[in-house]
Amino acid sequence: MKLIDLDGTVSFSKGEGAGLKFSSAYLPPEMIWQFPDGTFAVRSSDSHANDETGQFVVSLLTAHPSFDIWALGCVVYLLCTGSTLFQATVNDHMSNESDYFVLHLWTDETKTKKLSLIRNKIARNFVSMLLNKDPEKRPSARRLLQHPYFTGKTVTRLVGDDAKWDVFLSYRSDADEEIARMIHKTLTESGIRVWWDKVCLLPGQNWEVGFCSGLVDSANFVCILSREGIKNPNDPRMNWEVLENDSNCDNLFLECRLALELRERGLINGIFPVMIGDKDSHGKYSNYFKGKCKPDAPKVCVNLVESKLREHLDRESLGYPYRERGTVHAVLQDILSNQGKFIEGDLRYAIEDVCSSIRMMVQFFNKVSVIHAR
């Protein structure tokens, strides 16, 4: 086997410019240049205009693999629909001048209309990733090879698909089951679809697989954190401060790690920490931070958690982790960097306050999804 017709290639690692040779029908939006007079052309050494001094002006781009990812999207689009992304000549150049303007803008409306011609939803999802206007959001070839379009594996949910559950409820059952039950009851009574293991795990189902599949099929992640659950001085199994590289897999930590990965992929919208203070003799709860309930999480990666993460992502056909490794410290900081609520003072009023905010989060992201769908 021989690779041929590579006369238009350049070295991106050496910082060489793109556009020495091109087929305009397969170029990404960033390669289209708009002149001051409103006309468009390809950013190349042949594209130029006169500025006020009479000199040639051209803005070239440094070559990058993301350009080829877009071109691959154009090829797969042709294979799936039988037509090119834009009407093209026999030399693979765009034949309509107006299409340069459409490509330069590449709006969500244009993309949705074009992709609607791809009937297979897995192929449509695959091409949508390739034809992302933002080059930094186009996936690498390595990650593309893990997509179900190539692997043929079934997947619980693709980016853009509606979630089965509005909220995934993550908690330490040995420590915070009572509060999880109250949150579940309050939310479900108000019409929120909540994945909670006590009612959603199927009989005979592997609990770890069930947890991760439920999370993949949820739109938002609610994580209950307490001293007893993740900073327990009497039980190292529930203390993130003592986690080490060779520790056993902490399942609550695994859920947090997976939730952050799913958010990177656009499957999880909101992450909502519920922070529980210490309960005093009168049944009142202190402030989570003032009471120093937050663990001093170590900057170590738990190998078994990372191994489990890869296992579950692979089973769901979601590819490799976007974050190569996540330390306990980094994961906890990422979770707590999101706006959440405290279980503080009277429990009943605190639960109502927490659930009210969760409902607002769900409603907000539902509205955003509807706007994007349009």
Image (spheres, rainbow, N blue to C red):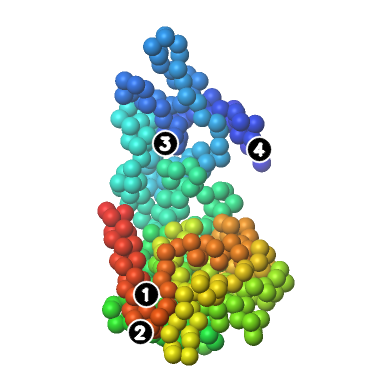
- Nearer to us: label 3 or label 2: 2
Q: Nearer the viewer, mark 4 or mark 2?
A: 2
Q: Amino acid at mark 2?
A: Arg
Question: Which of pointers 1 and 3 lies earlier in the amino acid sequence?
Answer: 3
Looking at the image, tell me whether mark 3 or mark 2 is earlier in sequence order: 3
Q: Please, what secondary structure does the residue beneath circle 1 have?
A: helix
What residue sits right under mark 4 in the picture? 2
Residue under pointer 3: 29
Quarter containing the N terminus? top right
Residue corresponding to mark 1: 354
Classify mark 3: helix, strand or loop: helix
Residue drawn at (50%, 65%), measured in percent from left and top?
335
Percent position of residue 235, x then y: 64, 84
Residue 95 shown left or right of residue 168 in the figure: left
Q: Are marks 1 and 4 in contact (CB under 8 Å)?
A: no
- Disc 3 marks which amino acid? Pro
Spot occupied by residue 347 in the image (x, y as percentages of width and height)? 39, 84
User: Is residue 243 positioned above or below 54 on the image?
Assistant: below
Q: Amino acid at mark 1?
A: Val
Cα–Cα span, label 3 and label 2: 54 Å
Q: Decide: marks 1, 2 in contact (CB < 8 A)?
A: no
x 52%, y 88%: residue: 204
Label 1: how many residues lie within 10 Å, few (<14), some (14-19) or many (20+)? Answer: many
In screen coordinates, is 349 left or right of 56? left
The correct choice, above or below, for 178 with respect to 55 in the image is below
Q: What crowding class fits label 4: few (fewer than 14 Cα within 10 Å), some (14-19), or many (20 or more)?
A: few
Q: Mark 3 Cα within 10 Å, few/some/many (few <14, many 20+)?
A: many
